[in-house]
């Protein structure tokens, strides 16, 4: 019953896959990622939403951030930091 903001804009992710699992109940999670980061988002929203506003998976072969979200009456949003 709250919210969190995760900021990956200055994080140095290792090559390959990094996984982030989110479970939100009556709350939300805003995730900021740098431009050019490959992001893959899947989710199960129940009375809520999961939104990926990043550039998506560019297939650059660099780091990949995979986000799996389970949301009940809340939301998860991925956006590119400006």
Image: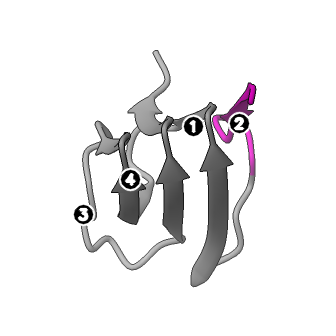
Snapshot quadrant of residue 30: top right
Which of the labelled discs sits on residue 46, or is there none? 4
Question: Mark 4 or mark 2, which has the lower sequence index?
Answer: 2
Mark 1 element type: strand
Q: Which residue is mark 3?
A: 58
Determine the CA span between mark 1 and mark 3.
18 Å
Q: Are marks 4 and 2 in contact (CB under 8 Å)?
A: no
Mark 3 Cα within 10 Å, few/some/many (few <14, many 20+)? Answer: few
Count residues near mark 4 (Cα–Cα under 10 Å), then give few for <14, some for 14-19, many for 20+.
Answer: some
Tag in front: 4 or 3: 4
Q: Is residue 9 found inside the magenta-colored segment of the image?
A: yes
Q: What whole-number distance in Å separates the C-alpha atoms at marks 4 and 2?
A: 22 Å
Q: Secondary structure at mark 2?
A: strand
Q: Are marks 1 and 3 in contact (CB under 8 Å)?
A: no
In-front residue for pair 6/45: 45
Q: Which of the two labelled residues, at mark 1 and mark 3, occupies the earlier sequence position?
A: 1
Nearer the N terminus, badge 3 or badge 2? 2
Tell me the residue that label 1 is attached to: 31
Residue at 48% over, 38% down: 73
Judging depth in this view, the residue of 59 and 31 nearest the camera is: 31
Residue placed at 42% from the left, 31% from the top?
80
**Tag 4's secondary structure?**
strand
Label 2 sits on residue: 6
- Callout 1 touching callout 2 (CB < 8 Å): yes
Q: Quadrant of residue 39?
A: bottom left
The residue range painted magenta reads: 1-11
């Amino acid at each position: 019953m709250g919210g969190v903001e995760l900021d990956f804009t200055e994080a140095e992710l290792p090559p390959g896959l990094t996984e982030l699992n989110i479970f939100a109940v009556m709350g939300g999670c805003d995730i900021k990622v740098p431009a050019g980061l490959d992001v893959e988002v899947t989710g199960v929203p129940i009375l809520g939403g999961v939104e990926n506003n990043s550039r998506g998976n560019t297939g650059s072969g660099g780091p990949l951030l995979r986000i799996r979200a389970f949301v009940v009456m809340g939301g998860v949003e991925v956006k590119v930091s400006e």
